Image (tube, rainbow, N blue to C red):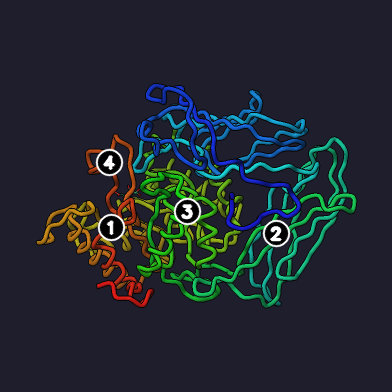
């Protein structure tokens, strides 16, 4: 299942069978084809832990008519073939894409997906980095049989009007037939319904907007995450032809001076940076593991998560919608220098990922803010121009949410004035020995003097490393659990005491595997700054965070003592 609720009642839509055949044609691969589970990454196979190459996934599928294959995510290049003929290609591991085979003869067809995780000239965003570029089909695959006219996109955002809540649905309808299609398109939310007529020429795609007045529905908030279904139905010639069901929540986010407001109430974000990765599953964690992460973060008192450094699986976002976890979602790009930003494909790849993220995830009420370009070259004219381009792209695609970018601590940033919320990554006490308070004050002064004065400020990363199970009873050695806990205590305390800050995201929730080229500064070839390790075993810092974020001890949650 691509989502955690039913998305169609009219359209024929089903998950592909989970068992596929994998062949690995490049050096270091398997001797022959093997059966594997999708979603999954090949690094979980004992023989493929370090395989970097192509993985050819094959499956026979019985289908016919206008067939649409939907891929939630293939890491990190995909080429899709049906019965040997190319259908589509996609770059980027973290967003969904489709492959359409119109007018297919009913029967057995062979679907082949070539995933490729080799770094190369055509890849500006996936580079050897401080997280691992896995290979595989890491998110669900669905197969759908479509009517000639179908809904190919739908996004719903909400706002508070004079007479109650409004939902704005942007819907795109596509006609695959040479013949014109005429009918109606309706949207129903919380019992309120709006309809428009649809007339499309042969092979035409049309965009429609429906504003649905929903009145005094229950608003969505972290404490009360009320959700509603938004059901779009397309009828052609008087008969239902297709549908699209999404799930939304009514809430409005805006900034006011230095504050971030949710439904008019100021927010104090206490959150984690979380990579989409789990010990035994790599990039393809099952929903149970996603839910456990949310439970652990909430148990520590967090109300927010940052999807560093790319868009996440919509199933994780569904769970955040359900549990009231606020989300900072960002498009893919981490730590690129000006030279890397000048890669001939950089702008197109970032903008495509950003567009896919906002279009695909824009209905999720949990998403509170959009981010982009983590720690890139915001201190050069060229880099700053790239930031401005992506920030305005996001605003154009979705004016309903503020935009931000997590910037490096070093001075000289040129884009503080271009963001709705200014965000900065700080590592005092870990990479440097200065006091947290001093580092924070210095950065705030610099931001204020360079265009960021009066805007909300978020500390988007702060943290320290510890190797799970390594102890120094004196608490002095770096990489010990004791030292990590002590540094986090100082960092969190200083940030939460700073009145000018409206959010803190700890770096990071769980340890993550990194590219081998990072091994010198990353023991175990892991980024060890998690407060839990890659298997979610808590380090000492877990308790520190729980105490400072105001989390609940396990005894409060379960009625039993934990100590
Ligand atoms: C940066 C970066 C993270 C991670 C972190 C660290 O701020 O955004 O991806 O690399 O530093 O662990 O140093």
**N-term-proximal mark, 3 vs 2:** 2
Q: Is 1 or 212 nearer to us in this picture?
A: 1
Q: Report which residue position mark 4 lands on.
A: 525
Q: Report which residue position mark 2 lands on.
A: 169
Q: Nearer the viewer, mark 3 or mark 2?
A: 2
**N-term-proximal mark, 1 vs 2:** 2
**N-term-proximal mark, 1 vs 4:** 1
Would the CB of label 1 be found within 8 Å of ligand 1? Answer: yes
Q: Do the numbered discs 1 and 3 sit on residues whose CB atoms are within 8 Å?
A: no
Classed neighbour count for the residue bearing mark 1: other residues with Cα under 10 Å, few (<14), some (14–19), many (≥20):
many
Q: CA distance from mark 3 to mark 2?
A: 23 Å
For image coordinates 23% across by 64% down, the residue present is 438
Q: Report which residue position mark 1 lands on.
A: 463
Can residue 437 be seen?
A: no
Would the CB of label 4 be found within 8 Å of ligand 1? Answer: no
Helix or strand or loop: what does disc 3 sit on? strand
Q: Report which residue position mark 3 lands on.
A: 371
Helix or strand or loop: what does disc 1 sit on? loop
**Percent x, y of residue 10:** 76, 52
Above or below, 178 against 433 in this view is above
Above or below, 167 against 237 in this view is below
For image coordinates 29% across by 47% down, the residue present is 527
């Amino acid at each position: 299942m691509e989502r955690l609720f039913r998305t169609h009642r009219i359209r024929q839509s089903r998950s592909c069978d989970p068992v596929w055949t994998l062949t690995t044609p490049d050096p270091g691969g398997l001797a022959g084809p093997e059966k594997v589970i999708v979603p999954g990454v090949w690094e979980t196979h004992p023989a493929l832990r370090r395989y970097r190459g192509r993985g050819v996934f094959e499956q026979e599928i019985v289908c016919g008519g206008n067939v649409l294959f939907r891929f939630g995510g293939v890491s990190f290049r995909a080429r899709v073939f049906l019965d040997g003929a190319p259908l589509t290609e996609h770059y980027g591991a973290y967003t969904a894409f489709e492959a359409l085979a119109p007018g297919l003869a009913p029967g057995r067809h062979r679907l082949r997906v070539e995933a490729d995780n080799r770094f190369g000239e055509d890849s500006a965003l996936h580079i050897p980095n401080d997280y691992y570029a896995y290979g595989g089909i890491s998110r669900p695959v669905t197969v759908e049989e479509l009517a000639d006219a179908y809904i190919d996109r739908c996004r719903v955002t909400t706002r508070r009007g004079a007479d109650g809540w409004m939902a704005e649905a942007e819907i795109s309808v596509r006609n695959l037939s040479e013949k014109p299609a005429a009918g109606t398109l309706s949207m129903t939310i919380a019992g309120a319904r709006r309809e428009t007529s649809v007339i499309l020429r042969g092979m035409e795609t049309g965009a429609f907007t429906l504003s649905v007045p929903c009145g005094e529905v229950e608003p969505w908030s972290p404490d009360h995450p009320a959700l509603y279904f938004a059901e779009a139905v397309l009828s052609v010639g008087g008969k239902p032809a297709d549908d699209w069901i999404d799930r939304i929540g009514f809430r409005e986010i805006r900034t006011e001076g230095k504050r971030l407001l949710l439904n008019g109430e100021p927010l104090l974000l206490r959150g984690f940076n979380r990579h989409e990765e789990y010990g035994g599953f790599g990039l393809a964690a099952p929903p149970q593991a996603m839910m456990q992460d949310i439970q652990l973060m909430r148990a520590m008192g967090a109300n927010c998560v940052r999807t560093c450094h790319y868009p996440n699986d919509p199933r994780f976002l569904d769970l955040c919608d359900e549990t009231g976890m606020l989300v900072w979602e960002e498009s893919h790009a981490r730590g690129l220098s000006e030279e890397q930003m000048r890669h001939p494909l950089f702008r197109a790849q970032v903008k495509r990922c950003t567009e896919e993220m906002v279009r695909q995830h824009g209905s999720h009420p949990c998403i509170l803010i959009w981010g982009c370009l983590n720690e890139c070259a915001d201190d050069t004219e060229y880099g700053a121009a790239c930031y401005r381009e992506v920030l305005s792209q996001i605003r154009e695609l979705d004016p309903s949410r503020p935009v931000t970018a997590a910037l490096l601590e070093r001075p000289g940033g040129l884009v503080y004035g271009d963001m709705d919320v200014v965000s900065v990554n700080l590592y005092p006490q870990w990479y440097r020995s200065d006091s947290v308070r001093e580092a924070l004050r210095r950065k705030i002064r610099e931001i204020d003097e360079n265009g960021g004065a009066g805007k909300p400020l978020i500390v988007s990363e702060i943290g320290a490393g510890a190797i799970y199970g390594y102890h120094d009873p004196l608490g002095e050695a770096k990489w010990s659990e004791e030292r990590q806990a002590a540094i986090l205590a100082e960092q969190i305390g200083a940030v939460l005491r700073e009145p000018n800050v409206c959010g803190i995201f700890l770096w990071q929730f769980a340890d993550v595997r990194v590219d081998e080229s990072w091994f010198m500064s990353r023991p175990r070839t892991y980024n060890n700054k998690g407060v839990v390790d890659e298997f979610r075993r808590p380090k000492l810092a877990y308790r520190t965070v729980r105490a400072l974020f105001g989390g609940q001890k396990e005894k409060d949650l379960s009625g039993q003592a934990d100590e």
